Amino acid sequence: MDPLLKQFDVDLRGAVEHFKDECSGIRTNRPTSRLIEDVQAEYFGQMTPIKQLGSIMIIPPREMAVSVWDKGAVAEVARAIENAGLGLSVSVDGSMVRLALPLLTNERRTELIKLAKAIAEKERIKIRGYRDDVMKKIKTGETDEDIMFRMKEQAQKAVDGANALIEDLLENKIKEIND
């Protein structure tokens, strides 16, 4: 495979992975550690992600808990989660910060679905930009018409595949939000 197309494939996979990461942070009715793990709490004068300050546990159906390793950081972790604007009910129980996820309203579900669709569209735009760049490079770099046509065809197949993956991930996320 041509190095140009290899790099293009890597870029496309990166866009799909970025979409997966972004979507995993969108809240559903099921708790996920991804929801709070990157929330920053002040710890000894430094902003530190919660995942580095304690263990995050899921307590089905709609609760989570953070077992903070340093009791002195419990209040900061609780404050950081409250200030993150995630709509979670926070309570402190010794060295444990308990979180309750309220049920999603229809209005909030609609907002979350719009957010997921906006993220998907942003990634599709990024993919189109990658495609345009690679098509220009193919056009300027190749002199053989057959090779140029084949490379463009491979690039378009890769774009179609990446867009299909994003669409599948989006549909799954919408299902998750509506559950």
Image: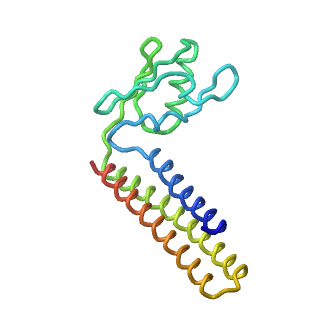
- Residue beneath the point at 36% across and 34% down: 101
Residue at x-position 66% and y-position 86%: 144
Instruction: Tell me if residue 93 comes above or below residue 133 in the rendering.
Output: above
Nearer the observer, 146 or 70: 146
Residue drawn at x 48%, y 64% is 162
Indicate the quadrant where residue 143 lies.
Answer: bottom right
The way the protein has been coloured in the rendering is: rainbow
Q: Kindly identify the residue that appears in the image at 37 percent across and 29 percent down.
A: 58
Residue at far right of view: 140
Q: Position of residue 157 (x, y in %)?
A: 49, 73
Left or right relative to 31: residue 126: right
Residue furthest to the bottom in view is 145
Q: Residue 86 in the image: state x and y as whole percent.
A: 46, 39
Report x, y in % for residue 149.
Answer: 58, 84
Give the total number of marks visible in the rendering. Answer: 0
Quadrant for the N terminus, please: bottom right
In depth, the one of 12 and 36 nearer the eye is: 12
User: Taking 21 as reference, is 103 left or right?
Assistant: left
Q: Nearer the viewer, residue 149 or 65?
A: 149
Would residue 150 be found to the left or right of residue 105 on screen?
Answer: right
Q: Quadrant of residue 6?
A: bottom right
Q: Taking 95 as reference, is 109 above or below it?
A: below
Q: Position of residue 21 (x, y in %)?
A: 50, 48
